[in-house]
Image (cartoon, grey):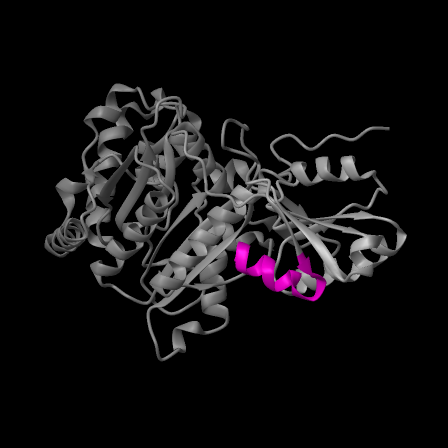
Amino acid sequence: MSFQIPRGTQDILPGEVEKWQFVENTARDLCRRYQYKEIRTPIFEHTELFARGVGESTDIVQKEMYTFQDRKGRSITLRPEGTASTVRAFVEKKLYANASQPTKLYYIGPMFRYERPQTGRYRQFVQFGIEALGSNDPAIDAEVISLAMNLYQTLGLKSLKLVINSLGDSESRKAHREALIAHFEPRIGEFCSDCQKRLQQNPLRILDCKKDRDHDLMGTAPSILEFLNEDSTLYFYKVQQYLTANGIEFEVDPGLVRGLDYYNHTAFEIMSNAEGFGAITTLCGGGRYNGLAQEIGGPETPGIGFALSIERLLAALEAEGIELPISAGVDCYIVTMGDQAKDRAVSLLNNMRNAGLVAEKDYEDKKMKAQFKAADRHQAKFVAVLGDDELANNVIAIKNMETGTQEEIALDQVITYLKQKTM
């Protein structure tokens, strides 16, 4: 019987995984500079966390979650996103009591959604996200957006577009909600069943519907920006001011609502305009969620964050033809001739590795010519040739594979020599 990988998942093999490592290490380094600390939460949580935290009216909760019962009949869900779990940990572990606030966290890990697989979108995907909890300062909104833009630009992406919007505070959203209901209710029967349910649950979600996006009422729906009160207007103005001060270009899009129920005030998306990237251009999305901690049993805590798919990021890099500077090859490949030399190579190889060199040798008892071919396949910078004669004279021949030059080095000096040449 043969087995195949489940639809919507992928094997990331050597040669490709190095790109992932480079991107993830770049993200970790940025977080270190911005003072975001890593958090690792469980792969699965109680289903109610996502129902309450993500929102009952969202497509994620209604259609996309991998939910099952454990052996005691409890409803468990593989995490579809990282914010709810991070805020749950923030509340449960009382991180809000720490003297230093805001609490700035990041995560990198697999998420799971049952949706139609397509380019850069999988049912198991890796998400990088950050969350800043405990500050109502619009400057932290600008910082979060800046970190996301910085990551893409550090990796070399240029065809980027940042769009922002304000969803307002609770007073502004309430006024907008009533206007949306009045706008859609007379003709709600023309919309899909999901939108009909959302009319009373969360009419803002109607604006995010993919099925009915071309309906004429969508283009004439009242804008949230028309209902922002004085405080919300000032907040949104300050976010734009700080982005401009950071040299970040953006567009205001009143139609940007994001797909989760917990957002308020700032919402944003970063998109790729690269030719050939695909119909779905969104790379990253995020926003402010000041009521989420309370929703899952914690104190009133403001928060803002974003999440992005590593798969989508790599697809954008490919679309722009960007090659990541992945270090390939080994520093030294040991070629042996004779049984004594072969035995001595085992400890020599180990000592090279302990000294920080990337080193390899033959394990298939190949002839000398075949060992040199293997060194080429490993893209070796140097080849160390050790035969029984060299061993008797306590020397080793070192060949520079780029220049073709060769010289003999004392066996006890070979590691020092290679470190000077490669490190």
Which residue lies most toward the right here? 339
Q: Which residues are magenta?
A: 409-423
State the image quarter where residue 210 is shown. top left
- Give the residue furthest to the bottom: 99
The percent coordinates of residue 418 (x first, y second) are 60, 57
Q: Is residue 388 visible?
A: yes
In percent of width and height, residue 161 lies at 27, 35
Quadrant of the drawing holding the N terminus: top right
**Residue visible at 55% across and 34% down in the picture:** 122
Q: Which residue occupies the foreground of this view, 232 or 12?
A: 12
Task: List x then y, in percent, for residue 340.
Answer: 87, 56
Residue at 50% x, 63% y: name it: 39
At a point 31% along the width and 46% down the height, the residue shown is: 149
Q: Is residue 194 magenta?
A: no
Say whether residue 296 is visible: no
Q: Is residue 325 left or right of residue 187?
A: right
At a point 33% along the width and 55% down the height, the residue shown is 289
- Is residue 279 toward the left or the right of residue 253 in the image? right
Residue 413 painted magenta: yes
Report the predominant secondary structure element of the magenta stretch.
helix
The answer to which of 318 and 127 lies nearer the viewer is 318
Q: Give percent across and percent down for residue 397.
A: 69, 51
Give the answer, above or below, for where 315 lies relative to 413.
Answer: above
Q: How many marks overall?
A: 0
